[in-house]
Image (tube, helix red, strand yellow):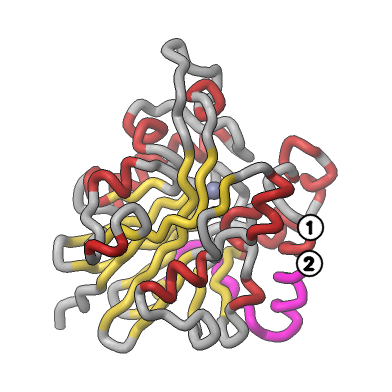
Amino acid sequence: MSDPQYEVYAIKYAHHARRASENFIGGDPHDGPMPLDFFVWLIRGGGVEIVVDTGFSAATAVRRQRDHIRCPTEGLALLGVDSKKVRDVVITHLHYDHVGNFDLFPAASFHLQDREMQYATGRHMAQPVFRGAFDVEDVVGMVRNAYAGRVKFHDGDAQIAPGISLHFIGGHTMGLQVVRVATRRGWVVLASDASHFYANMEQVRPFPIVFNVADMVEGYARLRALADSPAHIIPGHDPLVLARYPAPEKALQGIAARLD
Ligand SMILES: [Zn+2]
């Protein structure tokens, strides 16, 4: 039996203006504007509905000086998804821009790597360089979810539905995972922060927020191995995603892109 063919969407919920030198270890010799977009992703089809990451709230955007466009759950609602009914959420890693808002998914189980919880609750959080992109209340909230039996822990690669699998990469954080999805155009890989921009993986110039640089660089090759082509890899924060992929409908131009 062949794998199902899922619809896959990137949904933009926030934006941040910054310079290219902030997006690469060692800076950028041609420094100029290189903004970040913030996304959550949706996989659906054949009765399966999986949300990948949950974004951050308007309050967090103020605190961290990001431009919040809309609550990610409102973006999902534009595609007909009721966050209160979603049963499976993949958390690629526990950084504030990927796990905030988890409380808006009261029916969900959260798929997380063992090593990500270990990282976010362990010795490295004593260092500002590693804890800077974590919000302690998000992490504590996910610990509470673990005690409530709502975290599905994975140790490495795991299939969570026919044609949908999680793959441990690490690098950016200790337990970063990516998602591989069967679609009508082949295997698409939601890279999340395994590559923030196309340029990080294509030019092998790692992003400066990193736990292990070697694993991050190895991760670029892993992404290529998992995807049917480099054009099947979706970076986690690149505004080019909305430029390269069509909106699912005219009204969603600049808000969502269809990746399958
Ligand atoms: Zn991120």
Dot 1, how many residues are within 10 Å of its Cα: few (below 14), some (14-19), or many (20+)?
Answer: some
> Measured along the vertical axis of the image, is residue 252 above or below residue 211?
below
> Measured along the vertical axis of the image, is residue 208 above or below residue 55?
above
> Measured along the vertical axis of the image, is residue 231 above or below residue 139?
above
Q: Residue furthest right?
A: 126
Camera sees residue 143: yes
Q: Which mark is residue 136?
A: 1
Q: Residue furthest top?
A: 29
Q: Say what amino acid the circle numbered 2 marks.
A: Val
Location of residue 106 by image quarter: bottom right
Span colored in magenta: 140-158
Q: Which mark is residue 140?
A: 2
Location of residue 205 by image quarter: top left
Camera sees residue 115: no
Location of residue 183 by image quarter: bottom left
At 75% from the left and 70% from the top, the residue drawn is 141
